[in-house]
Image: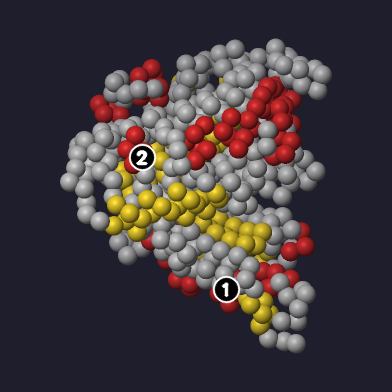
Amino acid sequence: GGGTVTSNLQYIDLSESDALGGTFSNLMEITSTFSSQFIYFPRLSDLYLSGCRLHGDFPNMAQLATFGSTLERCSLDDNGLTGTISTDFGTTMTNLRVFTASGNDLEGNLSAFGELVKIRHLNLRGNSFTGTIPEKLRCEDSTSGATLLEKLDLSRQRGISSAGTTGLTGTLPSFSQCEDLRRLDLSHNQLGGQVSENFLQSVDPLIFESASLSSNLIEGELPGKPLVRFDADAIDLRDNRITSLEIDLICDSSRSGAIAAFGCDAVLCPPGTYARIGRQEEADEPCLPCDIDTQSQYWGSISCGNDQSVGTESAPSTTPLDTPVNTPLYNEGPVIEKDVLLELYDATGGEDWFNKVGWATESTPICEWYGIQCAEDGTVESIDLGGNNLALVDGKTLPTSLFYLPSLKYLILKENTLFKYSNAELEFFKDIGAANLLEALDLSSTGLSGVSGIQGGVTLNEIHLDFNDFAGSTIPNELYSLNRLRILTMDSSNVSGKINGVFNFLKNLQVFSANDNKLDGSLLQGGYLSTLSTLRLRNNSLTGTLPTSLNLFVSLSVLDLSRQKSDESPGLEGPLLEFSQMPNLKRLDLSDNSLSGPIPGFFLAGVDPDMF
């Protein structure tokens, strides 16, 4: 008969399901396929509908209410959704923490998203939004949960406003109160004004990863105060209208890394010069002169202007495109690096990448292809194609030949659709042992669901697996074999179970972050790490008391064990520790637990108050 049926489902993943092709109303019909009754999901926490070929207007509140206001994570990436977002969306979705809808054609303003009181991860890359960034998304409204933001991606908006502007406009916000912010991408919009003196002033530089502000209309002098807190490449300001720098602070030779080697060129190329990435990172990729200074009037130019000739200085030398390099055998023959890269290009829909400069062209050396950096001998050392709209073509898998590039150290493929629904990871990691120089691997937000075979990557010291879906499984045992690992992040990756293996086996670990998962049990069941500097386990289901062995983590600078308490669990209980032997401690968060008793007399006694 007719009526409404209540379902107890908590997790729905229909991504890449061609049967859903159609409008969101079609999806409502599919939920009732096996019943003439309307189905309601009042307990649903996870809804994944990426790549379903959905089109038409963004779902209205009557449709979204079908899935309940309990929704915590929702992904609608890579569909054909259009229309505006009602403010009711923000005020109704009171538990939404992760919302991604990149690669659609949504339009209008962003005000609805400012009403999401618990949002942590908001990705709207590649839509058609216009207008300014709402006050609540700038963390400037004390009543807004947007102060919890960890990742905000509003890049590449292509909508055209009534005034004829493209993308987001207005003055660049300072985000000065966004304490938890880790990644910010506002690139390829029309944001203007100057960088504020208090830009990102509340952000912890130890956990902050990057802010991309490139290809906007930011102008005037670049102040030193906000930049000197971070690494030279942490804030990307290339391709703007920067007219001067506060050189004494920003380009101080006492700063480490590329600035010590290349001075101001490591921050932004000066007027009259240009570089592919707007600054110098390596000795063989300097800022090159333009024929006429007026062809690049601003700091951080990436070209000398449209159809303008550039200086005659020769490009860095590279290995010839068709010359095999001395590599391990792959498919019973030596690897030709260009062929490996083209295999990646073909398998991931290269024609649809956001940036494909140089790729698949005979005249451009591979070391000048977008996202590729080479070692001194011209072999590929780094592949960074994060957030570049890589998506596996039907029948293809991510090529394992990547691991046979002999000089490969950094493989960054985050924020692309590479694994989900294809089981590609079952084959991808099997040859990782061939990459005997590989140090860093970032597969965050790629649809990864397992890491079988990754234990072969014995040289890895940094792995990022955030915002994936491990289907409630435990932290993969394969990771425990990587005894060189220094950094491991798995935020919002749907892992559960105990964490004691991390402390028992990864003896060189310095950073471990697994926020917003389902980890449970007591905090430390044996083992401790004197090397650990950052431990972030916010919003899990840990129980028991704070173990006294936590005092042995003498290198800790950041400790976040907040929000373990829920309706089903009291979280952490018992007395508060003194934390008196942690001289490097800068940030401590134990909120939303059930700790009790008095504050110890020597609480934080050994902490440096100037650093805390």
Question: Residue at position x 41%, y 64% from top?
Answer: 117
Left/right of residue 325 with respect to residue 297 in the rendered view? right
Q: Amino acid at mark 2?
A: Leu
Dot 1 alpha-carbon crowd within 10 angstroms: few under 14, some 14 to 19, many 20 or more: some
Q: Which mark is residue 42?
A: 1
Where residue 45 sits in the image (x, y, percent)?
Answer: 56, 64
Q: Nearer the viewer, residue 430 or 404?
A: 430
431 in relation to 424, above or below: above
Farthest residue to the left: give it.
601
- Where, by quadrant of the figure, is residue 256 drawn? top left
Where residue 165 sits in the image (x, y, percent)?
Answer: 48, 55
Q: Amino acid at mark 1?
A: Pro
Q: CA distance from mark 1 to mark 2?
A: 39 Å
601 in relation to 311, above or below: below
Q: Which mark is residue 550?
A: 2
Image colouring: secondary structure
Q: Nearer the viewer, residue 443 or 100?
A: 443
Question: Residue at position x 77%, y 40% from top?
Answer: 396
Q: Secondary structure at mark 2?
A: helix
User: Do the CB atoms of the residues marked 1 and 2 lie less than 8 Å apart?
Assistant: no
